[in-house]
Image (cartoon, coloured by chain):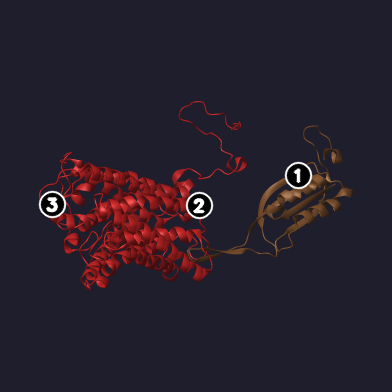
Chain colours: A brown, B red
Amino acid sequence: MKLITAVVKPHRLDEIKEALQAFGVHGLTVTEASGYGRQRGHTEVYRGAEYTVDLVPKIRIEVLAEDDAAEQLIEVVVKAARTGKIGDGKVWSIPVETAVRVRTGERGPDAL
Amino acid sequence: MPEGILTLAAAAPKIDTGNTAFMLLSAALVLLMTPGLAFFYGGMVRVKSVLNMLMMSFISIAIITILWTLYGFSIAFDTGNGFLGGFDWVGMRNIGLTEPFATFNIPIYAFAVFQLMFAIITPALISGALADRVKIVAWSVYIALWATLVYFPVAHWVWEPNTGWLFKLGVIDFAGGTAVHINAGAAALGAILVIRKRVGFKKDPFRPHNLPLVMLGAGLLWFGWFGFNAGSWLGADGVSAVAFTNTQVATAAALLGWLGYERIKHGAFTTLGAASGAVAGLVAITPACGSVSPLGAIAVGLIAGVGCAAAVGLKYRFGYDDSLDVVGVHMVGGIIGSLLIGLFATGGVGQTAKGLFYGGGLHQLGLQFVGVGAVLGYSLVVSAILAFLIDKTIGFTVDEDVEVAGIDQAEHAETAYDYAGVGSAARLASSSDSSEAPASGKKVDA
């Protein structure tokens, strides 16, 4: 199994969710995150005092996938997340040792 | 306060019910300004100190109300001498229900409760300069002493129509440019020159945590200010209508002035700039709203909007931590409005004095300088001494690590916003109405 993590622009969440559903993903986890990549931050002005805000709001999406579906799933997320502008985010995957469905105790791919 | 009416009514006037109703409603409007101010300031601080900011205003409502009842009204507005009122009205005694105030046709009680609301908001205005770092007990002692030694006497100087020395001199302050705004701004400056700065001043960003709250507060201030300015005529007639109109016009002009300055200088129209510009305009027109024409009010507003927008940057240059720009907005705005009377007074509204542009020469401008200088100097010096004494005895500010962790928890044992069940994880430790606290370690399902 693989854990696929995507850190992307918040307003792309709905597109990504719909694309994943169409692909056949049954569940995912979303958390609010903040950070920066090459985009860096932006400048804000309060009564003449200029502040550089480094960390910009992002969302982090986590999905578990079977090994043979992982590559395709990453492609689906990347396609749905892309606006073509700087700050679109990153997607990566890492191997997962096991997974358990809490209610039934099923393990491995059956738990997905 | 108007001079014109004094000569019109030599005999004690009869109570006018219309004017009395207007005064009571105006008093309620002015009270609303202080919660409005609390939100205006509260939105500008960081999330960890918003409750403290709100409390500084709310506790002012309570403390000043009691002091006003006990002796404040008497030493401000009983005849007394030029510098301080008398003691006949101590405890609000010796005030009849039908007795009018001075030569006005409203009951003394209506005047007293209207003026109470001014006495409340003036110390509350100072709180913005002391954000994030002041013990609530020290603040309470400070405003009680400052109101007693500065606000009550200065209100007497400026507004008591029989003896107040600035009033008799001919200084015009229709609704509080000197007595309220310069007074509060100078007190703020005196205090912050003595107490320590916020941790991280000039290094860390102090981003406002809730700008919609700032806008809401500015809106409430704007609304309440009609009572503040129009009500200060102490009657409902054409002059109070002009004062009301000028209040609206100058505020609009100042809002645009601040935004224009900001756009040129920093490239954006900010909501904080719009809210701040509105307040700067309200401050500046306060002393002048019974003297200038609506066209004059546009000039007063524009000058105040641009002037205050430029002035708020001075704290970084001179290194004083006027946290929410009480000096930059209230002291500077108050000075601008008070002095511009000397230029723009038409002589044909509430007051007969004419400014330079209306053929009155420099006479009124000179008087306005005296009023500004006297109030500014007195308030600044006494406030600095009070802050020094409080700091050396009970300590004015909290420890720096308390400030960094957030003053709300240390001083008020509360958190402003409960964002998440996990993050707060609150558990009932004790409850006054139940002797049975949950067994320790046992989760309470909320």
Residue at mark 1 shares a chain with residue at mark 3: no
Residue closer to the observer: B309 or B345? B345
Identity, as a three-letter code, of the amino acid under mark 2: Pro
Q: Secondary structure at mark 2?
A: helix
Classify 10 Å Cα crowding around label 1: few (below 14), some (14-19), many (20 and above).
few
Instruction: Identify residue for label 1.
Output: A28
Give the quarter of the figure containing the C terminus of chain B.
top right
Q: Looking at the rendering, which quadrant does residue A106 occupy?
A: top right
Q: Which residue is mark 2?
A: B212
Disc number lying in front (2 or 1): 2
SS under mark 3: loop
- Quadrant holding the N terminus of chain B: bottom left
Residue B280 sits in quarter: bottom left
- Between disc 1 and disc 3, the foreground one is 3
Q: Position of residue B46 (x, y in %)?
A: 50, 54
Give amino acid for label 1.
Leu
Q: Which mark is residue B9?
A: 3
